[in-house]
Amino acid sequence: MSDAFQATTAVVTGSSSGIGRATAIALAKAGVERLVVHFCSNQDGASETADALRENGCEPVLVSADLSLPEGRQFLIDQAFDSLGLIQTWVNNAGADVLTGIAATLDFEAKLRCLLEVDVLGTILLSREVAERMVNQADQQSSQQPAAMVFVGWDQALQGMEGDAGQMFGPAKAAVMAFANSLAQSTGPQLRVNTIAPGWIRTSWGETTSDYWDQRAKGQALMERWGSVDDIAKAVLYAADPANTFLTAQTIQLNGGFNRRF
């Protein structure tokens, strides 16, 4: 990775825990100077992320916003651009957690609607306005390297997976990935848009899951292990690296190599 992140700014949605927190910290270590820590309700987690950023010389800006609501999306946009000014990196990581906590008790339809409201509609409507602003900024800063927007998809969204999870997350993440590719077609060369599609990543669900899913996650990766949030953060930074000026409209599968022999 280059040193091109030095003295830049970034936004990471859903950065109070998991992949979002790891990505925010990685950006800080790479030299990002100011970063918006977005969260919906996990104030404690957002504060922990902010503390980690400060330890790495990055100034955090905490913004609480519900991305399923128009006013929440607009609040995040206004706060981000008012606080940071020129934004070099925007990472769309936020998504509804329907596998743990109270949401895990919802029926299939309620979980699906939640994913569609947050992961699909929320992400698309937020990103359209953010992208427009980032393109306008690039037009005004013609000497700058193109800004970057990175989405988080899912490696099995298009191939499909059995069960409720596949039938919920597949359509939601496939929609996000398709939107990202279309957005890239609309915003180049001022804005680079790429997607990281993780495989089995040990987030909060993976840490408490059954032996079956633990063995399956390890067995379906050629590297024979779960992916970590830090693995995803490294890939996000690769895609967002300001020096990667020829990388756009790509979906990078990060799953340890899908094991076709499993």
Image (spheres, rainbow, N blue to C red):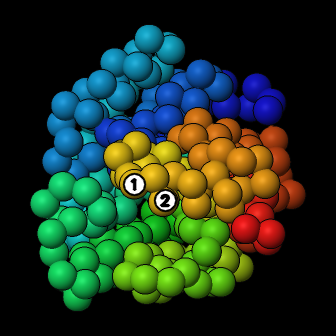
Above or below: residue 69 compared with residue 162: above
Residue tagged 1: 210
Q: Is residue 232 visible?
A: no
Work out how far the residue at label 1 is from the one at label 2, CA to CA, in angstroms: 6 Å
As drawn, the residue found furthest toward the right would be 246
| Amino acid under disc 1 | Ser
The percent position of residue 246, horizontal first and vertical second, equals 86, 57
Relative to 223, residue 1 above or below: above
Residue 183: quarter of image: bottom right
Other residues around mark 1 within 10 Å, as few (<14) / some (14–19) / many (≥20): few
The one nearer the camera, 231 or 41, is: 231
Whole-percent x, y for residue 204 in the image: 36, 45
Residue 112 image-quadrant placement:
bottom left
Of 57 and 24, the residue lying toward us: 24
Contact (Cβ within 8 Å) of mark 1 with mark 2: yes
Residue drawn at the location 63% of the way across and 84% of the way down: 158
Rendering coords of residue 228 (x, y %):
57, 41
Neighbours of disc 2 within 10 Å: few (<14), some (14-19), many (20+): few
SS for dot 2? helix
Q: Could you tell me the amino acid type at mark 2?
A: Trp
Q: Is residue 126 visible?
A: yes
Please report the residue visible at 46 percent of the width from the left and 68 percent of the height from the top: 127
Instruction: Identify the residue at image location x=55%, y=81%.
Output: 161
Q: Can you identify the residue that label 2 sits on?
A: 213
Viewed as shown, does residue 40 lie left or right of 146?
Answer: left
Q: Nearer the viewer, residue 16 or 73?
A: 16
Res 80 label: none
